[in-house]
C-alpha cells in the first residue's frame, strides 16, 4: 500500500463526533453491524475476522457474541495505531479469544481459516480492492462466508442531485469522502462484478439506509428516531439506491 500507519491516523478525526457526517455514518455502520451479528449467530460461525474498526459499531456486536460464548476466536485487524489503541481501551480488559492486530489488510495472514470474514466499509479505502478480496478468499473456510459493505455511488440522494444538475459525476468523491480516506465509489453491479472476479459468489444483498436528501438537508429536517429506523428497514429491499449496501459472499 502507499499509505503509512501515520497517514491512516490522519483520518482518525473523521471518526469522531466533531465530524459533520458522524451521526449518519454511525447509523449506517450500526445497521450493518446488527445485520452481521444476526447472520453470524444464525450460521454458527466460531472464528471471525474483521477488517477495520472505524466507528466500532460493527466490532462491538461481534465482540458480544464472543463474550457470550457463540464465538471462540475474534480477530480484528486495523493498520491505524490511534484507532486500534482507542478500541483496545474501549474494550479493556480484552476478553479471551479477542486478538487485535495492528497491520495492513494486504499483509495480514492466518494459518487457521475463518468461518466468516467481514469487511465493512473497507474496499473504498484500500489501494487495490481485488488484492484484499483474493487474500481473504485464501483465508476463509470452504463452507465459510464473507460480508462486504460499501457506500453507494447511486444512492437516491446522489441520483436526485445528479438529475438536478448539482452533481455532475455520480462517482466523484466529496470533501467528506476525502476526509474519511475514501478512494472510490461503488455501485451494486460494479461491486458484484469485482467480487466474482476474485473467487466469490454473491448469496445475499441488502441496503443499509435510504437517504433521499443530503446530510445537511436531512439534519435540518430533525427527523425522529422512528423515521431513521424506517429508513433503515425500507432500505434493506432497495440496495441499488440505498446510501450504502452490503453483500454476503461464499467461495465460488
Image (cartoon, helix red, strand yellow):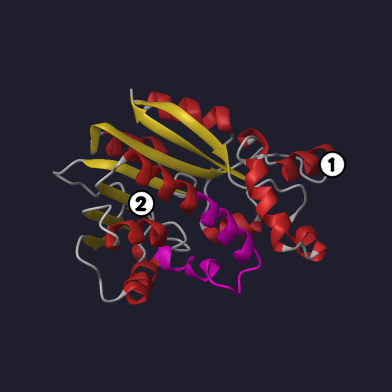
In the image, residue 17 lies in the stretch drawn in magenta: yes
Of callouts 1 and 2, the N-terminal one:
2
Label 1 Cα crowd, 10 Å radius (few <14 / some 14-19 / many 20+): few
Label 2 Cα crowd, 10 Å radius (few <14 / some 14-19 / many 20+): many
Q: Which mark is residue 9?
A: none
Q: Along the horizontal axis of the image, is 225 left or right of 29?
A: right
- What's the residue at 36%, 46% (across, down)? 41
**For numbered disc 2, what is the local secondary structure?**
strand
**For numbered disc 1, what is the local secondary structure?**
loop
- What's the residue at 52%, 71% (across, down)? 13
Examine the rendered structure and indicate whether residue 226 appears above or below residue 128.
Answer: below
The x and y percentages for residue 234 are 67, 42
Q: Which residue is mark 2?
A: 51
The x and y percentages for residue 61 are 41, 58
- The residue closer to the viewer here, 64 or 252, is 64
Image label count: 2
Please report contact status of discs 1 and 2: CB closer than 8 Å, yes or no: no
The x and y percentages for residue 23 are 62, 65
- What's the residue at 45%, 44% (across, down)? 123
| Quadrant into which the C terminus falls | top left
Q: Quadrant of residue 178 in the image?
A: bottom right
Q: Quadrant of residue 189 in the image?
A: top right
The residue segment tinted magenta is 7-32
The x and y percentages for residue 240 are 64, 33
Whether residue 242 can be seen here: yes
- The residue closer to the viewer here, 37 or 121, is 37
The furthest residue to the right: 164
How far apart marks 1 and 2 lie (CA) works out to 37 Å
Examine the rendered structure and indicate whether residue 72 appears above or below residue 168.
Answer: below
Q: Which residue is mark 1?
A: 165
- The residue closer to the viewer here, 218 or 72, is 72
Give the mark toward the camera: 1 or 2.
2
Amino acid at each position: 500500500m502507499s499509505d503509512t500507519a501515520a497517514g491512516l491516523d490522519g483520518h482518525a478525526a473523521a471518526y469522531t463526533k466533531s465530524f459533520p457526517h458522524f451521526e449518519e455514518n454511525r447509523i449506517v455502520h450500526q445497521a450493518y453491524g446488527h445485520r452481521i451479528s444476526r447472520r453470524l449467530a444464525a450460521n454458527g460461525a466460531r472464528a471471525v475476522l474483521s477488517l477495520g474498526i472505524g466507528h466500532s459499531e460493527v466490532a462491538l456486536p461481534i465482540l458480544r457474541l464472543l463474550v457470550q460464548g457463540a464465538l471462540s476466536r475474534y480477530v480484528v485487524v486495523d493498520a491505524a495505531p490511534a484507532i486500534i489503541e482507542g478500541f483496545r481501551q474501549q474494550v479493556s480488559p480484552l476478553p479471551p479469544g479477542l486478538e487485535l492486530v495492528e497491520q495492513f489488510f494486504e499483509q495480514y495472514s492466518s494459518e487457521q481459516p475463518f468461518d466468516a470474514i467481514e469487511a465493512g466499509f473497507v474496499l473504498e479505502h484500500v489501494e487495490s480492492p481485488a488484492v484484499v478480496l483474493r487474500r481473504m478468499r485464501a483465508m476463509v473456510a470452504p463452507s465459510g462466508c464473507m460480508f462486504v459493505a460499501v457506500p453507494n455511488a447511486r444512492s437516491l440522494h446522489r441520483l436526485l442531485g445528479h438529475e438536478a444538475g448539482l452533481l455532475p459525476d455520480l462517482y466523484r468523491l466529496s470533501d467528506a469522502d476525502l476526509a474519511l480516506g475514501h478512494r472510490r465509489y461503488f455501485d451494486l453491479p460494479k461491486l458484484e462484478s469485482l467480487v466474482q472476479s476474485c473467487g466469490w459468489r454473491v448469496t445475499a444483498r441488502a441496503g443499509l439506509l435510504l437517504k433521499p436528501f443530503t446530510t445537511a438537508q436531512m439534519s435540518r429536517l430533525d427527523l425522529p428516531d422512528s423515521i431513521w429506523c424506517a429508513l433503515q428497514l425500507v432500505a434493506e429491499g432497495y440496495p441499488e439506491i440505498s446510501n450504502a449496501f452490503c453483500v454476503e459472499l461464499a467461495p465460488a
